[in-house]
Image (cartoon, rainbow, N blue to C red):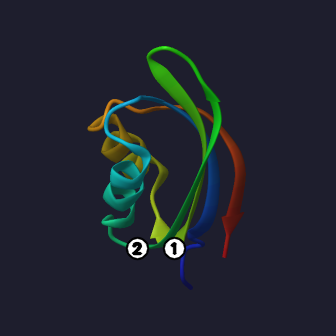
Amino acid sequence: MEKPQITHIVLDVLKPHQPPLPTFASFLGEMNGVTRVDISVVEMDEKTETLKVIIDGTQLDYEVLRSHMAMQGAVIHSVDQVVVE
C-alpha cells in the first residue's frame, strides 16, 4: 500500500524583498515533484514581504520545502492548508 503524499499545501511565508517574487517562484518551481506555484503578496514592509504560497505537486515534502525556501532567506510562519492523496 502506498503512503499518502502531500499534493497541495498553502503556506504563510515571510521573505526579504530579494530575490524578486518571479525569481522566488521559479526557484520553488524547480523542486522535484512541484507542478505549480502560486504566490500572492499579503503584506509588505520596509525589509520583508508576507506571502501566501500555494504549491501543488506530487510527493511534496514539507521539510524539503522549508529548507529550500530558507536558501532564499524565506521562513514559513504557518501551514494554512494541506491536501494529502
Q: Residues within 10 Å of mark 1 (few under 14, many from 20)?
A: some
For label 1, the residue is 57
Mark 2 secondary-structure assignment:
loop
Instruction: Write down the quadrant of residue 47 in the picture.
Output: top left
Task: Give the alpha-carbon distance from disc 1 to disc 2, as whole Å.
Answer: 5 Å
Mark 1 residue type: Gly
Q: Residue at x 70, y 65 (%)?
A: 83
Q: Are marks 1 and 2 in contact (CB under 8 Å)?
A: yes
Mark 1 secondary-structure assignment:
strand
Q: Position of residue 61 (x, y in %)?
A: 45, 58
Q: Residue at x 66, y 76 (%)?
A: 85
For label 2, the residue is 33
Disc nearer the start of the sequence (1/2) = 2
Q: Which sits in the foreground, 63 or 43?
A: 43
Q: How many numbered badges does the structure rendering display?
A: 2
Mark 2 residue type: Gly
Q: Which sits in the foreground, 7 or 47?
A: 47
The answer to whether 74 is drawn above or below residue 67 in the figure is above
Q: Residue at x 31, y 39 (%)?
A: 19
Instruction: Write down the quadrant of residue 2 in the picture.
Output: bottom right
Q: Residues within 10 Å of mark 2 (few under 14, many from 20)?
A: some
Q: Position of residue 54 (x, y in %)?
A: 61, 57
Q: Residue at x 40, y 73 (%)?
A: 33
Q: Position of residue 48 (x, y in %)?
A: 48, 22
**Residue placed farthest to the top in the image?**
46
